[in-house]
Structure formats: structure tokens, C-alpha cells
Amino acid sequence: MLATAKAGTTLDTFPKYLLSNAERFADRPAMRHKDLGIWQGWSWKEQMEEVRAFAIGLSALGLKRGDKVAVVGSNRPRLYWTFAAVQSIGGVPVPVYADSVAEEMAYVLDHAEVRFAVVEDQEQVDKLLSIADKVASLKQIIYDETRGLRGYDHTHLHAYDEVREKGLALIAADPQEVSRWEASVAAGQGSDLGIILYTSGTTGRPKGVMLSNDNLVKSALHGNAFDHLGPDENIIAYLPLAWVGDHVFSYAQSYTAGFCVSCPESPETVTEDRREIAPTYFFAPPRVFEGLLTAVMVRMEDASRLKKRIFDHFLAHARKVGEPILNGEKVGFWDRLKYLAGDLLVYAPLKNRMGMSRLRVGYTAGEAIGPELFRFYRSIGLNLKQLYGQTEACVYITAQPDGNIRADTVGVPSPGVEIRIAESGEVLYRSEGVFEGYYKNDEATRATKTPDGWVHTGDAGFIDNEGHLKIIDRAKDVGKLRSGALFAPKYIENTLKFFPDIKEAVAFGDDRDFCAAFVNIDLQSVGSWAERNNLSYGSYQELAQHPEVCRIVGAHVEAANRKLSEEPMMAASQIRRFLILHKELDADDGELTRTQKVRRSFISERYGELIEALYDGSTEKYVETEMTFEDGRKGRVSATVRIFDAPVCGAAETRMKEAAE
């Protein structure tokens, strides 16, 4: 670890890094935020002064060492500064998903025993006030945006500016406040609890993952070294504050490497803001990369015939030589020359459109990414890689090193990480980033973390001959068909989700005679197709059940089956029957987690009659389902859902016919 030039102490907490960066990188940009169409910026010195003033103001409000502080909102500098301010005086930040409904938020805040909450705006204040009787520990709420809050009772409600100004006034009245704050920073240790991050809770209530300062600092340093990240990097922070990935990429790595973090104006402007920033380091789950490619393909459908031919021609050439060129392999002169022409005409404008014209390192994780989708980005010259991680590991378990990247693996063990495969096939790991435990849940900690530090991932996988880890599926989700053949639902779902018209899929088959699936169409992609073909529709439900849409999805299922038939372990899990759901799966309805992962047990319970219809030979099924609308109101949606048979390929087809006979 580094040592601060000023105090001669070890840099083992982020507030210590902040003080060091204010000296080392004083006038270099630390953070930017686009507000009202204009990018505002703060240097590392200015950021330190903002954090210091807010921290001293929080102390004046009564925040003490060990207190928990909820942080709720979108990606804004003041919420990131809150992390450092709270940690600098010994408090523990507890970020909460901004789109959590009040009940979900109440559980986390009460379980974590938060005393303070720093939130973005009136919407979050209203949520907290509505659950105040369920969170007895909550004493003070601080908000950033003042709009709409003038008439509220401000006895325990404070504007961020008010707290900040209080800190500045205390410094002006007594300059020793600065020394006292710096002493508080120096008192922090790597072994101190740095943050509590609540898991998304695919089964049951979310658990509070306790990460120490050492866990986060060491993981960030390893990640920086692995990808050669330094103060010249620039990233855009747009992922949920409560997700470990954003905390590591946008906070921990920024402080330890000294690079600049840019916050978009709003979630809706992320793509355009990213184009203006052109980050050099970028992370996105596969869903984001799928959406970007879908948007590109939709636009190309509306392009002129000549532009479409040029686009298709050079993309075909990129698929042939793009990855070898990116990997530094030997490629013929004419192929390189043609690729340069393609870069000028297609690849560079395409990267610019996606906001990736300066991208040096890109990562995806969270779910498996389709091999074709992965290769597409790499073929046009983007150094996109995969990593495998968990909240309990401070993200990093495996990552793909430059020059050794394959679409079917998640890479080799990250620096400082040990991996082994249990007899059951479950992946276990041990590292400096391993969490301290689950907050107030010793039983869950013992079930997940062994006494000698090995952590059960819950994922099934294996290490291939080249030392790369391959993940098959969640260990608890991997099952078998009645024939004894392997059933890995996530693998099947990802095969379906490769198609831009399919946004989400849920596969069934454990202890069944065959595999079946639910499908959600992608409203943007299919809606654009409908407009081009003069097909009118009034709702998602109406579009999803249109005969032509059903035909298109059926063709995608058939193509997915052809792909599955080529995998010996998965050939028997081809999809025999499917349906298109009458509503989109939604986190507000409990069907997805806040990180957009499928809650299988909940879906199996909620849509049990549809699942049975897939297996009892029905061709349609009437269903009514409660759903939450965008304004928070609840209602019911009903539909007669059609059920389709799908052809299977290869040896699996023969076996199924034999079984039928």
C-alpha cells in the first residue's frame, strides 16, 4: 500500500486517499456532472474541500463513529461525496437502490439500523417519511434537490447545502476544525467496516454484505494494476449506487487510481452524455450492450439501401479479421487495409455513436453475454472483456487478461484470488476482497464462508485446460430432465436473449419431460419493426400476441434450438414449447431483482398455471395478473396467452420421437 506524503500513514481508507489525491492531483479533474445541459467539474482539491465541509456539518448534526447512513438516489457527485464524508468520521454508508419501493427500503433501513439518510430529491424523502414508523432508528434526513420540499416540516429534514454551509461556518469560526477532521481521517483503519451493501435478494430477503476498507482498497488496487488504470482514465457513472460494481468502478478505483468520474444529467441521457465524455474505461451488464446493438440495428433498418449494404459488408469483414487484429495476431496486408477502410466508414462512426470512441478497457458481467454479441463489439475494435464477481468478493473473482480472451469463459483468477471447484461442481474462491460477513446474520455467513476463508459462490462451473473458468449456471438452478440430461436454465435463456427481439426469457425443465420457456419481447426492437411494417398496436400485450410477432419469436426459438443442438451437454434441453408473456417481467412486481436478475421461485409460484399449461398440451390459457404501473398504482392485466410448439434438431429429435413411441 502507499503512504500519504503529509501524514506518513498507510493509505488504507478512501478518505486517506482523498487527502493524498488533493496533494498529488490537486488541480486534476476528480468528478464531473452534467446539470441543465452544462458539464460542471471539480478538481481533487475541490472535491476534498466539499467532502470535508459536509463531513463537519454531519458531525454537527450528531453523526458519530459507527453510525449507519443510508444513501439513496441516482449518480450524483454529492451522493458519492457522502460515502467519503461519512467514512471520514467513522460512519458506515448503506446505499439503497433508488427504485426500491417503500416496503423494500423499510426492510433495509430498519435492518441496518440507519440513523441518517442522504437522499437525492422529494421522491426519496416522501418514501422515507412514509416508512418512518417502520424505521425507528432513523433520526435525520438530508436531501440534495430542494424542489417541492419548501412546505415540509424541517425539524428532522435538512438541505444538503444547509449542512455543507454549517461545516464551512464551523471551519471559518475555528480553523482547528480542519485539523480535527484530518485527525478523524487518520484514525480510520483498513480493518474498519467501510460499507454495507445489500444483495439484490433472488431468494428471500436481501442480506447486508459487510466490506472492510481493506477489502475494497486492496481489490481496487489489484483491479487497477490488472488493467493498467491510472489518473488519465475517464469513466461515466450510471449504474445503481447500491450495486457493488458501481461502488468499486466509480468510487474505489477512482480514489485509488486518481481518475475522473462523470455523472450523467439523468438516466435517460446516459447514452448521449457518454458520447460527450467518451470514457476510456467502461462497465455494463450484457443487457446494456444488447440494448446498444438493438438500437443500432433498428436505425440501420431505416437507412438507405446503399448505407445498409456498406454497413453489412464491412461488418462481415470485421467478423473475419477484427478480433485477430485486436489481439495482435498476424493478419494479411489487404485484410488490414480493408479493415482500416471499414473503420473509417463504419466502425469509428459506430463507436462514436455508442459513446465508445476512446474506450481502452470495457467489461461486462452479471449475466453471461451471448458469444455473437461479445464478438461483435470486439470485432469493431472495442477491447470488451468479461469478468466474474460477487458483492461478497468486492467484484473481482476472475477476469480476462488482454490477449487471452474467449467468449465462452469468464477468464482466469483475478490477482490475489484463489479458486477451486468443489466435488459438487460449485465454484469456491478466497481472496483479500472476501467480505467480513453478513450484517446481523451469522447463520448465513457460516453457510457461505468457511472458517478458512473460502466462499461458496452458488455457481456451478469448471476450470478448463488453459486455466479459464467456465460458469454453467447457478448451482441451485442446475437440474436434470427426467431422462437424466443436464438442464441449465440460464444457458438456455441467454441463448434466447441473443436475439434483439427477445428482452427476457425464463426456462423450465427440471424434473420434467422436456424444456419449455416464457419469453418477453423487446418493446423497442419489436415496436420499431411494427412501425416499419405499418402494424398498429395499442399496448405491449397486444403487440406480444400479434400472430406475426409470434411467428418471429418462433423462428428465434427454432434458431436457439439449432444452437443448443450443437452443444452435447445441452442438446436434450432444446425448447419444445414456449409462450410470450402478456406483460413485461418487472422488479416492481417482484419478478426481477433490482439488478434485473430473474426471481425463479417467485415466477414459478406466480405463473404456475401458465407453466402447467406448457406441459399439459394446452394451446392457450386465460390468465389475470396484478401489476404495478409507472405511477405506483396497482392494477390487473388479463389476457388469453397462446402456447406454441417448437421444432427440435439433431439427435434430440430422434430421442424424443422414440420416447413418444
Image (cartoon, rainbow, N blue to C red):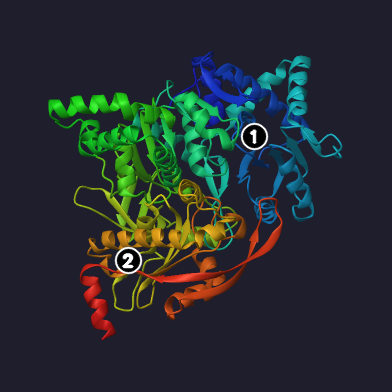
- What type is the residue that disc 1 sits on? Val
Which residue in the structure is indicated by mark 1?
86
In the image, 222 versus 108, the foreground residue is 108
- What type is the residue that disc 2 sits on? Ser
In the image, 477 versus 351, the foreground residue is 351
The structure residue drawn at horizontal position 64% and vertical position 34%, both measured from the top left corner, is: 86
Q: Is residue 231 visible?
A: yes
Q: Position of residue 71 (x, y in %)?
A: 65, 40
The structure residue drawn at horizontal position 49% and vertical position 61%, both measured from the top left corner, is: 546
Alpha carbons under labels 2 and 1: distance apart: 42 Å
Q: Is residue 415 visible?
A: no
Question: What is the quadrant of residue 651 in the picture?
Answer: bottom left
The extreme top residue here reads: 27
Q: Secondary structure at mark 1?
A: helix
Q: How many marks?
A: 2
541 vs 405, left or right, is: right
Q: First in sequence: mark 2 or mark 1?
A: 1
In the image, 269 versus 447, the foreground residue is 269
The structure residue drawn at horizontal position 74% and vertical position 36%, both measured from the top left corner, is: 142
Q: Position of residue 132 (x, y in %)?
A: 78, 51
